[in-house]
DNA sequence: TATTCATGTTTCACTATCTGCAATAATATG
DNA sequence: CATATTATTGCAGATAGTGAAACATGAATA
């Protein structure tokens, strides 16, 4: 029995899908399947009732799930008290942020952090900004750089790093002189989801405009790419443009809806602050 | 992190000797040394302060020891509740007994037990009868067939299987006609330790006799061997002779000290009865 | 009914890890 | 100073873990 097996089991128990659990755990379903089979063998009991279409916990699985959670938590507590005891922080911390964030503030934050705590290994995942809060909320990441959304999920705390206005951008060579009447015909490139998208959606709804959405993109950086290629007018936080290698290819559009600025900061689940590692990162922002 | 590492760690922490722990765990000191090193690496902390002559727990080791014991206990509890849940007993049970016991009653007990609980794998260790109670008391074995001693260690329960008188035996060809005056010169072959030895020692002390001890032997069976070879007069429980392949080579000596019969039975730590496996074995005696 | 799709399991080849033997290093003991 | 004791390390063989791809099964769809 080892902690890894417990983690694998808990993830499968929570997703009830080998495929999904495999993705979350960064392992093939084959490995996952065998891990579970081995666990069942070791315990002498079936943990999941599964056929080709469904996966369900058995009673024994339910008991084992409680045990596993408890056991993993005890392990966390142990690591924490060992770190307190030895007064040296070590272990690993996972951070999620967008590519833009990794270009801009993350570098400074991490350089500083690394000097303070050289023995903490960092696990950096980049991806769509919009998923940051979800991932932290689901426990997939310890901390994330995210846009503040209201309301924040319960138990999540947020520290603002900076504000950046939401701006419309067009290709540098686009000479069109947009005016307010054109909103419905403006070829828009919007984030697929996230705070920026909700802001603009709300804004259109309020004005009773039905916009033409040319493309929906996951990841702000790709919006800049598309805009620079002339696909249309894009909505992004200004900081994304500033840090984009394509900054010279786009320009800020004269036409600007009146949207609240994008508030970028670090978020973390309050309960995770009990971990000295997370605490150290948080305290340093 | 796995349970095996915890078990290894706890054993080393209890013995504070790689050599001793290695013997208890049936593994080489090399493997043991590396297991501990790996554990320390994983935890990022030294668990033992060790030089070439001594091993001592660090503070972190102390913390980890508490965790380990707790964790192993939780694991036991889990296995128990899973077995209760699935109503099928499986796992492994360790049994200690003398060679004689394995010849005589053990066969019947185990045959029966195996039929009732085919999925419980048995770990049978044979050795000197005198160590049986100690080994159970130290937690090295789940159950043992042993001679009742008074007082029994605290928390140990005992079920009598049979009584067998303690008898003196000589070689079949020994024609000597011993009488009570000869006690001091009688060449005695006695168990090195254990109930039989204490009984005879007490008996001699009471009579103020200083006996001639020809040989002290660990393991009753070997006493029969030595007696049959003519080395002297041996003291053993009658049942040992009855089950010995050398039974025909020895005879019961006319001279008999008045010793209480040897009481053979099964012993187990009371707290171990909480395990369904041990319980099943115990209930079946 | 046939086809496609989704999803858990098995096979297979490869790799990493574990294990014990033997040699080594360091130190107490006589 | 020689010997015994004890933890660690080098090495090679054994064991276990891993993902790609093929497989098996059953639902959804045409």
Image: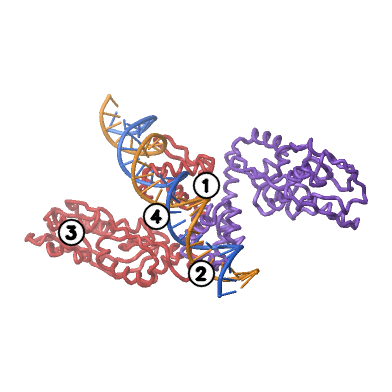
Chain colours: A purple, B red, C blue, D orange
Q: Quadrant of residue D1?
A: top left
Q: Label 2 to label 4, Cα distance in Å?
A: 29 Å
Q: Mark 2 Cα within 10 Å, few/some/many (few <14, many 20+)? A: few
**How many residues crowd around disc 3 within 10 Å: few (fewer than 14), some, or many (20 or more)?**
many
Rendered image: mark on residue B85: 2
Kindly identify which residue carries mark 3.
B224
Q: Residues within 10 Å of mark 1 (few under 14, many from 20)?
A: many
Rendering coords of residue B212 (x, y %): 17, 51
Disc 4 designates what residue? B138
SS at mark 2? helix
Residue B248 at least partly seen: yes
Residue B150 visible from this viewpoint: no
The residues tagged by marks 4 and 1 sit, at their Cα atoms, a distance apart of 21 Å
Residue B27 image point, x, y percent: 37, 47
CB under 8 Å between discs 3 and 4 = no
Q: Nearer the viewer, mark 1 or mark 3?
A: 1
**Which label's residue is closer to the chain start, 2 or 4?**
2
Q: Are marks 2 and 1 on the same chain?
A: yes
* Disc 1 chain ID: B
For discs 2 and 4, the disc positioned in front in the rendered view: 2
Which residue in the protein does label 1 denote? B64
The quarter holding residue A261 reads top right
The earlier-in-sequence mark between 4 and 1 is 1
* Pointer 4 chain: B
Q: Earlier in the sequence, mark 2 or mark 3?
A: 2
Which is nearer the eye, B104 or A111?
A111
Judge left or right: residue A5 versus residue A224: left
Q: Are marks 3 and 4 on the same chain?
A: yes
Labels 4 and 1 share a subunit: yes
- Residue drawn where x is 24% and y is 63% of the image: B100
């Amino acid at each position: 029995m080892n902690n890894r097996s417990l983690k694998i089991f808990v993830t499968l128990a929570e997703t009830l899908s080998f495929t999904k659990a495999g993705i979350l755990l960064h392992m093939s379903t084959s490995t996952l399947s065998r891990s579970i089979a081995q666990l069942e063998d070791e315990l002498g009991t079936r943990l999941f009732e599964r056929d080709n279409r469904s996966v369900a916990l058995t009673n024994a699985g339910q008991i084992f799930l409680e045990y596993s959670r408890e056991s993993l938590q005890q392990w966390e507590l142990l690591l924490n008290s060992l770190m307190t005891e030895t007064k040296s922080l070590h272990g690993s911390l996972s951070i999620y942020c967008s590519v833009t964030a990794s270009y801009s503030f993350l570098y400074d934050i991490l350089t500083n952090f690394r000097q303070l705590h050289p023995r903490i290994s960092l696990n950096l995942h980049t991806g769509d900004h919009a998923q940051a809060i979800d991932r932290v909320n689901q426990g997939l990441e310890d901390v994330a750089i995210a846009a503040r959304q209201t309301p924040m999920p319960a138990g999540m705390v947020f520290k603002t790093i900076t504000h950046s206005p939401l701006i419309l951008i067009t290709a540098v060579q686009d000479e069109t002189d947009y005016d307010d009447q054109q909103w419905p015909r403006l070829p828009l490139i919007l984030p697929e989801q996230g705070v920026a998208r909700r802001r603009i959606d709300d804004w259109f709804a309020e004005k009773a405009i039905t916009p033409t959405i040319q493309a929906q993109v996951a990841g702000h950086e790709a919006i800049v790419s598309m805009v620079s290629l002339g696909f249309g007018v894009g909505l992004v936080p200004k900081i994304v443009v500033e840090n984009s290698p394509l900054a010279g290819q786009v320009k800020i559009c004269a036409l600007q809806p009146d949207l609240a600025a994008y508030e970028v900061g670090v978020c973390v689940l309050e309960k995770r602050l009990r971990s000295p590692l997370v605490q150290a990162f948080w305290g340093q922002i």
